[in-house]
Amino acid sequence: MIELEINGIPVSVEAGTTILDAAEQVGVKIPKLCFHHDLEPWAACGICVVKAEGSPKMLRACATAVAPGMKIITHDPEIVKVRRTVLELTLSTHPNDCLQCGRNGNCELQTLAEEFGIREVPYEKRIAEIPVDNSTGSIVLNPEKCIKCGRCAKVCQDMQGVWALEFIGRGEDTRIAPAADVTLNESPCIKCGQCSAHCPVGAIYENDQTRPVWNALEEGEKHCVVQIAPAVRVAIGEAFGMEPGTLSTGKLYSALRRLGFNAVFDTNFTADLTILEEGSEFVKRVTEGGVLPQITSCCPAWTDYMEKYANDFIDNFSTAKSPQQMLGAMAKSYYAEKAGVAAKDMYVVSIMPCTAKKFEVSRDDNMSSTGFQDVDVALTTRELARMIKQAGIEFTELPEEEADSLLGEYSGAGTIFGVTGGVMEAALRSAYYLITKEDLEDVNFIDCRGLEGVKEAEIDIKGTKIRIAIAHQMGNVEAVLDKVRQAKENGEELPWHFIEVMACRGGCIGGGGQPHGATDEVRLKRTAGIYTDDEKSVQRCSHHNPMITKIYEEFLGEPMSHKAHELLHTGYQE
Ligand code: HC0
Ligand code: SF4
């Protein structure tokens, strides 16, 4: 342990701890802009400067490790003056249109300007005039607002391994853009939205589609139904001051009814349906000698990545649509029939923790046999939080309601889709039954859980050994794919039979459309909320969801039936 003093307070921390983290441990907050706990520090902005006794120059707290006996001063008039200058210079190249900004109220620059009492900026205002890029339909890049902190590029390169964003230009003209200055849609971007989740200001944000949803609700011409994704329920509370991980499912159902939706459904229901389809597909591949390893396809950023960069795995991809798409297809067929509404008059909205889901709804291959796009609009958790506020709904005071039963009842297996390893764990719970016709005594697959980048396990299903891998955070995925490629090339035994991939760290709970401020601490709290939901569920396995049984009996026939294929399966671009 290293002993030091911060503002005269003795502190003892592990070797390698930065001054910034050591200060946080004694309740001293050092301002930061380019630094984010997910990323390696690179000391770009200079706002975190501190003094160390005996050091001739100020140190950057984010990138300087503590040393024994250090005496650090984090705040004095001279330090505050330096920080103010950093802020004033940043503000001199930043527009003053906070009132119309998507980050109004939770912008890190705005907060600092308020804390420092900035009332005027003594430097000439120089705003870059570069057009807004909304080419992806998922995320919007507004270069005017960029403060060149570099977080977005770092997250895209280091965490996601995508390299869609980088610094281009020199000197004053340096800016963040896709390489070669193409549009985002022409770039390698996979629309995961992690850049928007890490941007401290309003330079990259979700494509706000709340207007068309308001219009549909106001006009009342369409039968509007809504679904909520697994991970939304443990994060939306944060937008209303609740602790990360607070389970808000019942309040969400009430809020959506108050917004005017005709029916409130749950994506967890179709997560259960996905397991029956994808689990049966897996069992078929294993028992009948299909292409292995089977790879999950429900994360649209991962699907985009595979189609662009890992096309050799196209036959490994599960053909099961994602739960979001399945719910749309079931709403416009089974539910529409029951409700006596024509599919053309249905308007399906989904609330997702994800920006790439906006892209998924418009993929051509998700035009189902209903003849209509499965889901009309996908909103992020952040967009729904704004709609709830606009409607004057006090979210924390809402009563707990139930979802509409036809497409709303779910098992614990459905809810754990929201965390890394959850789709695999849910699939294993049912694959065991599908292979043995017996139920597991213990449904908890602990090896599937946690934030380790790649998790592996071997499961013995009454003599059939199934090897699985789970990867999350896009940058961790290539190594897994390479291992499969190598085994194939060398004619060796495949390392795994089944692989789950989620593009975001922690799975969907860490999605690019979730409330800002996710760190591993927050991700773990959201994850705990999901497992609580699983544990308190009456049914823990998808095949025990009574509404799933009913839907097969009444409508789909059996998993992988012709009808199920038409409605619930898809294909990928060569
Ligand atoms: Fe997910 Fe999903 S679990 S991708 O992370 O499979 O976005 O929450 O809705 O569709 O269910 C996101 C979350 C979903 C889908 C489900 C899957
Ligand atoms: Fe990179 Fe994801 Fe942002 Fe695209 S959405 S620029 S892939 S971080």
Image (cartoon, rainbow, N blue to C red):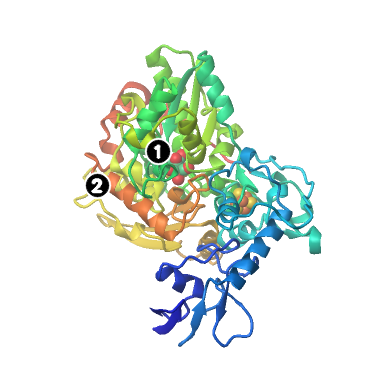
Q: Is residue 444 above or below residue 76?
A: above
Q: In the figure, is residue 143 to the left or right of 2?
A: right
Q: Ligand 1 appears in which quadrant?
A: top left
Across and down, in percent, residue 418 comes to 40, 46
Q: Is residue 50 above or below residue 444?
A: below
* Residues at discs 2 and 1 in contact (Cβ within 8 Å): no
Which residue is found at the position 56% from the left and 48% from the top? 192
What amino acid type is highlighted by mark number 1? Thr
Check disc 2 and report the residue beneath it: 535
For label 1, being within 8 Å of ligand 1 is answered yes
Mark 2 vs mark 1: give the one in front.
2
Checking the image for residue 274, the label placed there is: 1
Across and down, in percent, residue 496 comes to 43, 59
Which residue is found at the position 57% from the left and 48% from the top? 193
Q: What's the distance in space between the residues labelled 2 and 1, CA to CA?
A: 20 Å
What amino acid type is highlighted by mark number 2? Glu
In the rendered image, which quarter contains the C terminus? top right
Residue 288 seen in the figure: no
Residue 150 seen in the figure: yes
Disc 1 on helix, strand or loop?
helix
The local crowd at label 2, few if under 14, some if 14 to 19, many if 20 or more residues have their Cα within 10 Å, is some
124, 451: nearer the viewer: 124
Picture quadrant of residue 227: top left
Which residue is found at the position 36% from the left and 54% from the top? 525
562, 270: nearer the viewer: 270
Across and down, in percent, residue 176 comes to 71, 55
Q: Earlier in the sequence, mark 2 or mark 1?
A: 1
The local crowd at label 1, few if under 14, some if 14 to 19, many if 20 or more residues have their Cα within 10 Å, is many
197, 356: nearer the viewer: 197
Which residue is found at the position 54% from the left and 49% from the top? 302
Across and down, in percent, residue 202 comes to 62, 47
